[in-house]
Image (cartoon, rainbow, N blue to C red):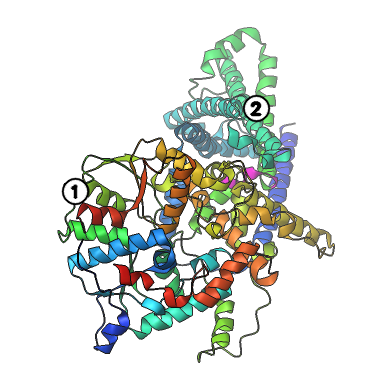
Amino acid sequence: MSEPVHVPTVAEFAQRGETPEVLFWVGCAGSFDERAQKVTKAMVKILNHVGISYAILGKEESCSGDPAKRAGNEFLYQMQAMNNIAILNGYGIKKIITTCPHCFNTLKNEYPQMGGNYDVVHHSSYLQELIDSGKLTVEGGSFKGRKITYHDSCYLGRANNIYEAPRRVLEALDGELVELKRCRANGLCCGAGGAQVFKESESGDKEINVERAEEALSTGAGVIASNCPFCMTMLRDGVKHFNKEDDVEVLDLAELVSKANDL
Amino acid sequence: MQWISQVVFALILIAAIYFFSRNVGKIRRNILLGRDEDRSDNKPQRWRNMLRVAFGQSKMAARPIPFILHFIVYAGFILINIEVLEIILDGLFGTHRILSFMGPIYDVAIGFFEILGLGVLIACVLFLTRRFISRIPRFHKPEMAGWPTRDATIILISEIVLMTALLIMNGADQALQMLGNPHYIDAGANPVSGLYAGWMHGTFSEGQLIFIERACWWFHIIGILLFLNFLPYSKHFHIILAFPNTYYADLTPKGRFANIESVTNEVKMMLGLPDVDTNAPPPESFGAKDVQDLTWKNLMDAYSCTECGRCTSVCPANLTGKVLSPRKIMMDTRDRLEEVGKEMDSGVQPTEEKNLHSYISKEELWACTSCNACAEACPININPLNIIVQMRQYLVMEKSEAPNELNMMFNNIENNGAPWQFPASDRDAWANQV
């Protein structure tokens, strides 16, 4: 393993009178959820590896407001948005990278309505850029030849029409990408969005994540690639439902890339 | 005698146009009961969308079989209406095939319409087969019971009957041409009706043929005028509204939910920010309690919906047995809006207890994952999710009726800046273990 890494904060940059080139927006799941923290760490390793000037907000970051807005609590959403925008604008942030498609969508599409205008990039697009520009190489890593399937998250896919970038990253891994039956614009939701992940689902005859995990398992892929911490939770629970957690891994794109590079 | 039929025809035509216009006017009024929303920007893009999605039916192609069948009926509808124009002119002026002076162009056109007419007829029979024999599941969801299914059946059978009348009329016309009847001038190519015109020629007398031809002519045109007047009462109104509905569809990414401006001012006041508009009137209410609180575009969506159920067939909640059906959201919005419109027409005082939430339950609203599959699947860019979110806003901000777990989530965000109960001071704890 490599040396312990110091994760710089924007405040540290500000003390030196500097602004980082990019802000890594970690998000609530990436900060607190034990599984999603691994994705955060993988992303930090990649950022260090490529040597870009980046920082996090640290304790100054707060929920983007996405779940509040989707659940109909516009007051709470706007309070969160206003506070976050005040901090981001205060630091003069221009470019934001985030590993959560919900944060990505809210910051990119909804903050401008409240006076927050940034170049917001989801990490799947960022990773693709790094690979395309040669700053990051992933070929011939541990995923060479392995069957990987990809789950389109709703907030990256339909919500923002990003279908190619994550696939390009996966193709670069030299694995065998097998598409799910319902993919791209027809992708089936994992069941978490719209604040569903914070409550029990309404009564029905199946859980959505079980339906989706069943579909993913039917591809025979050993890895289910995701790009969203909530999809990650839902798919892992779905895989566990079928007692397949020892055979099938659910991994984020950042984890796949960092593992392929032995970071 | 001829003038009597011309006068009768003119009266029927005027009545048909009058009633149709009146009903369309009511629908327009009902749509405009909705909240204002500016959709006048980026006209070139809007035209392109309309041409591609409505005129070009691009989103139908996702399902090839219904796409082909629907395209035949759609092309038939647009093109055979050129022949209806001739029928109207003939009816008014007492002429017969007034446009036949165009010679070969006319012949080819009539021949083409016959082939299309037969295509429409076959497509409608296949549509009925899909609906009632193959029983495609999306046509048999609970919200389709009763009128919606009858509505669909009426439309398909009407089209079959209308096309049959047109083809019999042409057959009789051609048989009369063979007899050399001077009124039935030599006009039109008849690739379909030509197959049985000879048989009709040998079977019926000249008088019978004239009767058949006239009867089918009247039946066809009166049928079409009745069909026109059925549209405002039917899901079939989509043949008109699909065009403006795709024109006015949202151009922003599907993930972007609109900001509620009135909330912004309130929040700024709460946070003690300087640029507060202190003269702004306090907002009357938040979110959608009833149809008038939705935008006019939401209401146009409701009138545009033809209940095909593509939205419901891809909805993750519906697929896993929850009560939510995006199609039902649109149908309920239209039904409630029609009810409000009727109350206005009859001068009845609206009942306080009844609103859009009387039609759409909380269980439906809270089952939505906001995944946008419904909006993506809609062939004419209807957005059920937008209505769901506005109704949630009413439940949360006006009634405080969010599910308990969501209230806990709200509290956590407010207190800890995260939807879970973790202290904000631990937000970057992970950074020490990289």
Amino acid of disc 2: Val
Where is mark 1, residue-wise? A141
| Chain part drawn in magenta | B233-239
Left/right placement of residue A185 relative to residue B297 reads left
Give the number of marks.
2
Q: Around disc 2, counting alpha carbons within 10 Å, would you say few (fewer than 14), some (14 to 19), or many (20 or more)? A: some
- Name of the residue lying farthest toward the top: B202
Q: Residue at x 44, y 39 (%)?
A: A215
- Front position in the image: B16 or B236: B236
The type of residue carrying mark 1 is Gly
Q: Secondary structure at mark 2?
A: helix
Q: Is residue B61 visible?
A: no
- x, y (%) of residue A175? 24, 43
Please check whether the numbered discs 2 and 1 fall on a single chain: no
Q: Vertically, is A60 above or below A201? A: below
Q: Is residue B127 visible?
A: yes
Residue at numbered disc 2: B161
Q: Position of residue A30 (x, y in %)?
A: 39, 65
Residue B50: % across, % down: 46, 52
Q: What is the quadrant of the C terminus of chain B in the image?
A: bottom left
Tell which tag, 2 or 1, sits nearer the viewer: 1
Is residue A176 toward the left or the right of residue B235 in the image? left
